[in-house]
Image (spheres, rainbow, N blue to C red):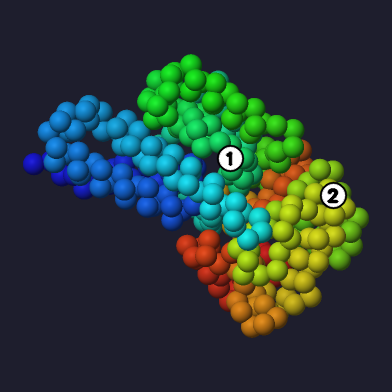
Amino acid sequence: MRDLATEFEAERGRLLAVAHRMLGSRSEAEDAVQETWLRYAGALADPAARAEIRELSAWLTTTCARICLDVLRSARVRREAYPGQWLPEPAVRPVGAAAPTDGYAPDPAERAVRTDQVGTALMVVLERLAPEQRVALVLHDVFAVPFARVADVLGTTEVAARQLASRARRAVTAPDVPRQTADPAEQRRVLEAFVAATESGELDPLLRLLAPDVVFIGDSGGHFPAARRPVVGAEAVGRFTLGLFGRAGRYAHRVLARPVLVDGVLGLQLETVHTDGRPIRMVTAFAVHEGRITGMFNQLNPEKLTEVPPLGDDDRWPPRW
């Protein structure tokens, strides 16, 4: 008797990675993987369906991707009614922690998309794509799924699947997309300088760290005051972040802070108390290119931070590197 649970568990981590990249929501990704398990168990109970499972990993990926495609089509309607700006749930882990194994092996020809657009910046721009484009890009360019199988997921031809991925690739690499190309050492240098600049309370040091077209996006889910539109441009973002992070310095005795990895890229986690007494947890991801910050993505929505471990009493502002 086949051990269904063991077979499936061996694939779970990769399926979660696929679903999270497609959906931008950890909880939705987990639901999609659970639904994949139910369909797998159901297929094995049906001789005709079981005969179609020739290669387990491929079958599970295809099934999970189809589930995600259905979720994406309905999610577009839900997110249009979202209060303020929408950001994906961040995957937060300690600096220095081993990255989870995603199980992907991107083709060399497509590797540029993955290396040039990692972290929250990629997750944000994926939201611009039509569901079919997003599925094609994630499956092929990130997880190296052949276009023949991508076409099967989308119910289209291989030529059409290639065209969908090509359009998505152009959107991901568009000039207005915040670029993240910095290695960990450069990320740390820029973030250390960013913290020092906000501590100084002076705008000029901060402007030297911000790209001219830098963008700041904040998501509070309506729970806390937040900019309802992206803040764009070095001076506007500089003044906005001085107010946001400058308060951390002024009330350092009440602020916990720590560098963390956010979707694989260096960022900051802060915790404090709102003026009305409610606790605030904030995770900020940064995109850095050629020594300057090109994007800041500030997640304040407590519903999207439930999986983020709390900070300890030793994690005081300013953060220690």
Q: Residues within 10 Å of mark 2 (few under 14, many from 20)?
A: many
Residue drawn at the location 66% of the way across and 70% of the way down: 224
- Residue visible at 75% across and 44% down in the picture: 294
Can I make out residue 206 in this image? no
Depth check, front residue: 285 or 208 = 285
Q: Is residue 202 left or right of residue 149?
A: right
Q: Looking at numbered disc 2 in the image, what kind of residue is underneath it?
A: Ala
Contact between marks 2 and 1 (CB within 8 A): the answer is no
Q: Position of residue 113 (x, y in %)?
A: 59, 30
Eyeballing the image, is 83 above or below 185? below
Viewport quadrant of the N terminus: top left
| N-terminal-most mark, 2 or 1 | 1
**Which residue is disc 1 drawn over?**
126
Residue 238 appears left or right of 31: right
Foreground residue, 282 or 236? 236
Q: Position of residue 156 (x, y in %)?
A: 43, 23
Residue that numbered label 2 is attached to: 234
Disc number placed over residue 40 in the picture, else none? none
Residue type, mark 1 in image? Leu
